[in-house]
């Protein structure tokens, strides 16, 4: 085995949704393995706090960008700003995500569009900017999309979220196939139920909590840190021949009947 397979020294990663939850854990993990990190989210105070946390656990450079990824038309200009500050981006993690829970027949179009814009369209548009950037440098790159168990299956009241994550899986495969010629590997991670702000209400719901524990062979909620190892693997040369895949980090959920 080559040594330093997971070493990200000299790389810079861009993590959307890197100010808290899974994105922050991944940003920290990438920095601890040697990468500088740029993070995007809306809330400026949380971005500042995240920057401090990443710097407390690594000596790597951290850049923060406050931006609403629902504004998909503004992403190209944002990406140019990011490149002018960071110099280059080698690894893109599309992690920002949102949800809108309601019976399918009651979901209004505004809520549907917001979920699609943030979870799917923004990931596509920023990936396009990233690909053009890597092509210009004539360098390989890595894209990691944060999917969900809902890349695979559905639950009532999550039609917009599940549709966006199903789309994200096909985006992963499509870009992997098309951009292999540029040596851009595109993969996804499908987290199971992870204890973050996004799932705070679900964790507090006793019935839901019992259901999650009963469906998860490892009998616990995942923690944001559970996603880090797979993200570092997919960002590093340890996964040079892996593209177009989704790795489920779900405590065994999808393996169980
Ligand atoms: N938690 C789970 O159980 C779970 C399971 C499967 C998949 N996932 C996926 O994992 C990803 C992260 O989830 P999480 O649980 O860590 O969520 P979280 O704790 O709610 O964090 C979401 C992150 O995305 C950012 N964000 C949300 N909307 C944004 C927007 N419009 N523009 C820019 N940034 C935005 C948030 O920052 P601001 O609010 O400041 O913008 C925050 O940094 C999502 O794609 C989610 O679908 C989560």
Image: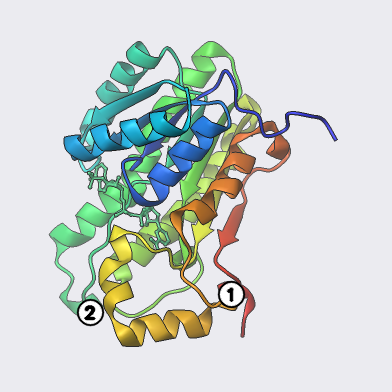
Residue name at image x 44 percent, y 37 percent: 27
Left or right of 33? Residue 13 is left
Left or right of 246? Residue 123 is left
Is the residue 88 above or below the residue 44 in the image? above
Total tally of numbered discs in the picture: 2
Task: Report if the beta carbon of the residue with label 2 is closer than 8 angstroms to ligand 1.
Answer: no
Q: Position of residue 158 (x, y in %)?
A: 31, 71
Q: Earlier in the sequence, mark 1 or mark 2?
A: 2
Q: Which residue is mark 1?
A: 218
Instruction: Answer with the quarter of the image where residue 25 lies.
Output: top left
Q: Which residue is mark 2?
A: 103
Q: Farthest front residue?
A: 56
User: Which type of secondary structure does the marked residue at label 2 adopt?
Assistant: loop
Quarter of the picture containing the C terminus is bottom right
User: Which type of secondary structure does the marked residue at label 1 adopt?
Assistant: loop
Q: Position of residue 51 (x, y in %)?
A: 33, 31
Residue name at image x 21 percent, y 75 percent: 102
Q: Position of residue 92 (x, y in %)?
A: 47, 33
Left or right of 57? Residue 117 is left
Residue name at image x 49 percent, y 52 percent: 225
């Amino acid at each position: 085995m080559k040594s330093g397979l997971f070493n990200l020294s000299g790389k810079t990663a861009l993590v959307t949704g890197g100010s808290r939850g899974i994105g922050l854990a991944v940003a920290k993990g990438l920095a601890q393995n040697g990468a500088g990190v740029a993070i995007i989210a809306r809330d400026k105070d949380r971005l500042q706090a995240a920057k401090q946390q990443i710097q407390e656990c690594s000596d790597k450079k951290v850049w923060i960008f406050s931006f609403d990824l629902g504004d998909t038309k503004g992403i190209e200009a944002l990406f140019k700003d990011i490149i002018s500050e960071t110099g280059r981006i080698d690894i893109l993690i599309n992690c920002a995500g949102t949800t809108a829970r309601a019976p399918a027949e009651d979901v209004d179009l505004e809520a549907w569009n917001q979920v699609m814009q943030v979870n799917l369209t923004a990931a596509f548009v920023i990936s396009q900017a990233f690909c053009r950037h890597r092509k210009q440098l004539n360098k390989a790159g890595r894209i990691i999309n944060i999917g969900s168990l809902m890349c695979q299956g559905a639950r009532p009241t999550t039609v917009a979220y599940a549709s966006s994550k199903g789309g994200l899986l096909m985006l992963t495969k499509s870009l992997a196939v098309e951009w292999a010629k540029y040596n851009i590997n595109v993969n996804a991670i499908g987290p199971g139920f992870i204890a973050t702000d996004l799932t705070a209400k679900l964790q507090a719901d006793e019935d839901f909590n019992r259901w999650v524990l009963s469906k998860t062979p490892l009998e616990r909620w995942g923690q944001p840190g559970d996603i880090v190892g797979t993200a570092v693997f997919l960002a590093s040369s340890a996964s040079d021949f892996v593209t177009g895949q989704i790795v489920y980090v779900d405590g065994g959920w999808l393996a169980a009947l």
